[in-house]
Amino acid sequence: MFKTVLFPIDQSRESREAADTVANVVKTYQSRLVILSVVESPEDGAAEAPRRNTPSPEAIAELLEEAKALFSEQGIEADVLERQGKPAFTICDVADEIEADLIIMGCRGLGLTEEGAAESVTNRVINLSPCPVLIVP
């Protein structure tokens, strides 16, 4: 049913907590797992850039290797991808590119207001995704 699962990660607690769900789904369906980290490009919205601490390339590489090792300990082989761009759009583009059957991602709960919901990466992925999206609260 889910041949390819895309797991976009960042350095948040919610990403780490979603890993258990990802492992369960991948094991249950014997899926291919692709772990993605998106480095946000600072091109548009200069006002947005200062509000986030952009991780270094080394930190991203370490994050991806730690995630890969975590799944490897559970007998799950994972491919890792690092991309640059706007997170929601990049996640959906990669899902389309790898022909993902499911995206699993953690939710930070930042969309509790109408304004926050419209701006959240999670909401944008849900609305733009070429495949089903499982949000882990």
Image (cartoon, rainbow, N blue to C red):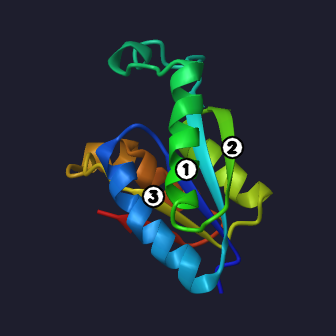
Crowding at dot 3, Cα within 10 Å, few <14 / some 14-19 / many 20+, comes out as many
Seen at 74% across and 59% down, the residue is: 96
Q: Image height check: is 33 above or below 59?
A: below
Q: Reading the chain from its start, which is encountered first: label 2 or label 1?
A: 1
Viewer-nearest residue: 42 or 18: 18
Q: CA distance from mark 1 to mark 3?
A: 18 Å
Evaluate if marks 3 and 2 touch, with contact meaning CB atoms under 8 Å apart. no
Secondary structure state at the residue bearing disc 1: helix
Quarter of the image that includes the N terminus = bottom right
What secondary structure is found at the residue carrying circle 3?
Answer: strand
Residue 122 horizontal side relative to residue 67, left or right: left
Kindly state the secondary structure of the residue where label 2 is placed: strand
Label total for image: 3
Q: Earlier in the sequence, mark 3 or mark 2?
A: 2
Question: For the residues carrying marks 1 and 3, which lies nearer the camera in this image?
Answer: 1
Amino acid on which the number 2 mark rests in the picture: Leu
Residue 13: mark in rendering: none
Rendered residue at 57%/74% (across/down): 26
As shown in the figure, which amino acid type bears the numbered disc 1?
Ala
Q: Is residue 14 above or below residue 119?
A: below
Pointers 2 and 1 in contact (C-beta within 8 Å): no
Q: Which mark is residue 105?
A: 3
In this figure, which residue is indicated by the disc labeled 2?
A: 81
Q: Quadrant of residue 99?
A: bottom right
How crowded pointer 2 is (Cα within 10 Å; few <14, some 14-19, many 20+) is rated as some
Front of the two marks 3 and 2: 2
Q: 84 left or right of 47?
A: right
The amino acid pointed to by label 3 is: Met
* C-alpha span from label 3 to label 2: 15 Å
Would you name the residue on which mark 1 appears? 69
Cα–Cα span, label 2 and label 1: 14 Å
